[in-house]
Image: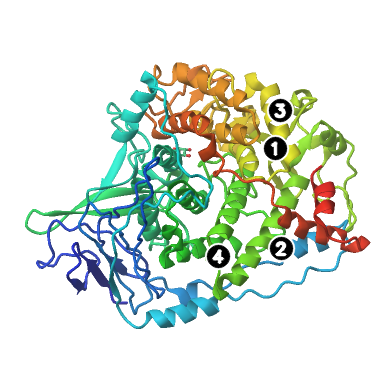
């Protein structure tokens, strides 16, 4: 296969092709920033700057004259609408070659029959199958690819400024915080800004940890997708959109970049776990910068970063909401990025459930912790990202089927999680009395859970008030551990019913000492001990009981807790937790995590100056102070989705579908 290098320069007066993956041509300007485009021996160099949009709150309205749109698919993922203060940069290029290799890779694998399967095979519902049309996404992609074969398109992007037009009319202006920042906040901002990584002179992300005394940073000197999310929110809430825009565009460039793990390439649409800016020597003592992504092929344990793409979609929506710059999500290359992620997530497999099937360690807990299968964290991020994507997909013929698939999956997923993941005192008592070995579609105990599986700790621990979503569900297996991120994000995204969401916070309040203790918040509860620890973690010395992922306390979870509390009108709880964190974080040098049952000690191997601990704290403070901004970051119940669900549920009894019915049956 030929290697082609497309070089895009700034200012974009020339386009060059070379025959090597790295540009070594003497004609190549030494100060040029380079990033690899993607896939199949095709590397691109980049126009280095995305001079994004800075949200200027409280300013008089400015017109956003975003860049002209590029019509064809297959274009490079380089786009840089400049602000008025900078010389214009440029966008290249629609390439005849298969930059994104659409025709073969984005085959329609969207399985919108999962919903049907669940209800038909699920047992207690003798319903007519939901009729769903076959999804044929390829059509559109192939068509667009054809268009893309016209050759290189080259377009200059006009100037842009932010039109603070009120985020869909939701926010007209945003008050800059009136009060003086505390010393801790000032320090946090300084540290956060020090953690910023630049690529070709523009900010593109933040390193995971920035401890000057750390001689062995491993990969903590990289920009992790998931770690950057609280940093992004901190910047967005502060009115600084540029770094977030750059991050979104650069990570998009890295999506599905050719990487292999022992001769096997991960699926198209995968977003990397992290990336690093590397300096590569050119001839004549000159250097250039390249972005080097890690899709898990270097990661400890070779874990798959399933959550990266989900977070990317969530952040993309938030960027639009908080800056008012919706042109980013409307761009063709960005739309393609969303579709690639969706296709990867919605593709058919052997699975029986609407939840996403993943390997162990595919999310924040990125080591073996017995969370393979259908872990809650992935399900709630999946649900959120589907809701975000549905909002952002531009309405066009080609995305109609995808949107339908997304809707079906959302309905099925919320029904599945609400029904089967939820536990409270009453439900545990039901499980305690379950009959087993029920062979029929009518089974009550569908997953054949043996009551003996209910752990002893849970029988004592479950409070009268409240409940939570369990960590995982598989045939004959319920993982009863409480996983904080999944539960918080179920609240934020309305994956849970309003009552369940309220009950989760009630439970956290009732179990404050266990889940918040001296430092918010426990990543999961309780810890795996003894034989369980040996078998499930593989005797992992980093994940000993009440340490790290195995029941450690992670300050970064504070911002998600704050958001969940704000949605449910429980600012009091958030405030209490933030106050606790504020007392210690700075004094302890912003650790990554804390150890022991109540989070008393700085984690055994915790990094210091961990960026998402810093950013999580700042984001929490700002969310509390800007409830009008927080409110665009969470979702209320979607009754249309429920209607879907109820239609399937009620067709056996020929009940009419209605919102009322939806409310009465699902909002238990
Ligand atoms: C640890 C965490 C992971 C995080 C990474 C970088 O591996 O488990 O969630 O992204 O550190 O901070």
Total numbered labels: 4
Q: Residue shown at 76%/72% (left/top)? A: 131
- Do tag 3 and tag 4 residues touch (Cβ < 8 Å)? no
Q: CA distance from mark 3 to mark 4?
A: 37 Å
In the image shown, does 1 or 655 lie closer to the viewer?
A: 655
Q: Quadrant of residue 135?
A: bottom right
Q: Position of residue 440 (x, y in %)?
A: 89, 58
Name the residue rendered at 39%, 24% in the picture: 185
Q: Nearer the viewer, residue 563 or 212?
A: 563
Name the residue beneath numbered marker 4: 343
Give SS at disc 2. Answer: helix
| Spatial CA span between label 2 and label 4 | 15 Å
Q: Secondary structure at mark 1?
A: helix
Residue 19: name its quadrant.
bottom left
The residue indicated by pointer 3 is 506
First in sequence: mark 2 vs mark 4? 2
Q: Which one is closest to the eye, mark 1 or mark 2?
A: 1
Which numbered disc, 3 or 2, marks the residue that appears first in the sequence?
2
Report, in whole angstroms, how far the alpha carbon at label 1 lies from the one at label 4.
Answer: 29 Å
Mark 4 falls on what kind of element? Answer: helix
- Compare marks 1 and 3 and give the one earlier in the sequence: 1
Residue at the disc numbered 2: 114
Residue 239 placed where, x, y %?
38, 41
Q: Where the C terminus falls, by quadrant?
A: top right
Q: Are marks 1 and 3 in contact (CB under 8 Å)?
A: no
Element type where label 3 sits in the image: helix
572 sits left or right of 336 in the view: right
Q: Which mark is residue 501?
A: 1
Task: Give whichever of discs 3 and 4 has the lower sequence position.
Answer: 4
Work out whether 93 lies above or below 22.
Answer: below
Between the C-alphas of marks 1 and 2, the distance is 25 Å
Q: Residues within 10 Å of mark 4 (few under 14, many from 20)?
A: many
């Amino acid at each position: 296969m030929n290697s082609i290098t497309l070089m895009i320069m700034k200012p974009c007066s020339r386009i060059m092709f070379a025959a090597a993956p790295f540009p070594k041509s003497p004609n190549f300007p030494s100060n040029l920033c380079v990033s690899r485009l993607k896939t199949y021996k095709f590397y691109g160099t980049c126009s280095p700057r995305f001079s994004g949009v800075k949200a200027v709150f409280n300013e008089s309205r400015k017109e956003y004259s975003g860049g002209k749109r590029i019509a064809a698919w297959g274009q490079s993922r380089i786009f840089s609408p400049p602000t008025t203060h900078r010389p214009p940069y440029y966008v290249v290029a629609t390439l005849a070659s298969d930059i994104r290799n659409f025709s073969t890779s984005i085959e329609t694998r969207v399985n919108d029959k999962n919903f049907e399967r669940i209800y038909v095979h699920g047992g207690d519902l003798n319903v007519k199958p939901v009729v769903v049309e076959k999804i044929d996404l390829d059509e559109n992609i192939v068509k667009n690819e054809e268009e893309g074969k016209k050759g290189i398109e080259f377009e200059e992007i006009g100037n842009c400024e932010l039109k603070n037009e009120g985020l869909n009319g939701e926010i007209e202006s945003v008050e800059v915080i009136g009060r003086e920042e505390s010393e801790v906040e000032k320090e946090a901002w300084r540290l956060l800004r020090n953690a910023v990584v630049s690529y070709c002179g523009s900010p593109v992300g933040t390193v995971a940890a920035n401890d000057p005394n750390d001689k062995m940073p491993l990969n903590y000197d990289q920009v992790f997708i998931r770690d950057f999310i609280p940093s992004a929110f901190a910047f967005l809430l502060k009115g600084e959109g540029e770094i977030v825009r750059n991050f979104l565009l650069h990570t998009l460039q890295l999506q599905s970049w050719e990487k292999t793990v022992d001769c096997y390439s991960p699926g198209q649409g995968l977003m990397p776990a992290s990336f690093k800016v590397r300096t590569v020597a050119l001839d004549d003592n000159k250097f250039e910068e390249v972005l080097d992504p890690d899709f898990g092929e270097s990661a400890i344990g070779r874990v798959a970063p399933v959550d990266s793409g989900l977070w990317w979609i969530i952040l993309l929506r938030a960027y639009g909401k908080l800056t008012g710059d919706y042109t980013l999500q409307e761009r063709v290359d960005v739309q393609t990025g969303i579709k690639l992620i969706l296709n990867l997530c919605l593709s058919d497999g052997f699975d029986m459930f609407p939840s996403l099937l993943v390997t162990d360690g595919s999310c924040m807990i990125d080591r073996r912790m017995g969370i393979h299968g259908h872990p809650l964290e992935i399900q709630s991020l999946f649900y959120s990202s589907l809701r975000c994507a549905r909002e952002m997909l531009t309405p066009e013929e080609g995305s109609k089927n995808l949107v339908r698939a997304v809707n079906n999956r959302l309905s099925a997923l919320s029904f599945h999680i609400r029904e089967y993941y939820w536990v409270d005192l009453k439900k545990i008592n039901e499980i305690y009395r379950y009959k087993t070995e029920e062979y029929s579609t009518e089974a009550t105990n569908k997953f054949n859970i043996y009551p003996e599986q209910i752990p002893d700790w849970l029988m004592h621990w479950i409070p009268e008030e409240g409940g939570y979503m369990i960590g995982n569900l598989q045939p004959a297996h319920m993982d009863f551990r409480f996983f904080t991120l999944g539960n918080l994000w179920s609240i934020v995204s309305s994956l849970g019913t309003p009552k369940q969401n309220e009950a989760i916070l009630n439970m956290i309040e009732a179990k404050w000492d266990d889940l918040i203790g001296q430092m918010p918040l426990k990543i999961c509860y309780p810890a795996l001990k003894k034989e369980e620890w040996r078998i499930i973690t593989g005797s992992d010395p980093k994940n000993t009981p009440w340490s790290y992922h195995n029941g450690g306390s992670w300050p970064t979870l504070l911002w998600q807790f704050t958001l969940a509390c704000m949605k449910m009108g429980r600012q009091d709880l958030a405030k209490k937790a933030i106050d606790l964190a504020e007392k210690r974080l700075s004094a302890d040098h912003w650790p990554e995590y804390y150890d022991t049952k109540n989070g008393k000690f700085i984690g055994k191997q915790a990094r210091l100056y961990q960026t998402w601990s810093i950013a999580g704290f700042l984001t929490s403070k700002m969310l509390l102070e800007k409830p009008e901004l927080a409110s665009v970051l969470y979702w209320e119940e979607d009754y249309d989705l429920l209607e879907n669900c109820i239609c399937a549920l009620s067709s056996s009894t020929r009940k009419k579908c209605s919102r009322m019915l939806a409310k009465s049956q699902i909002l238990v």
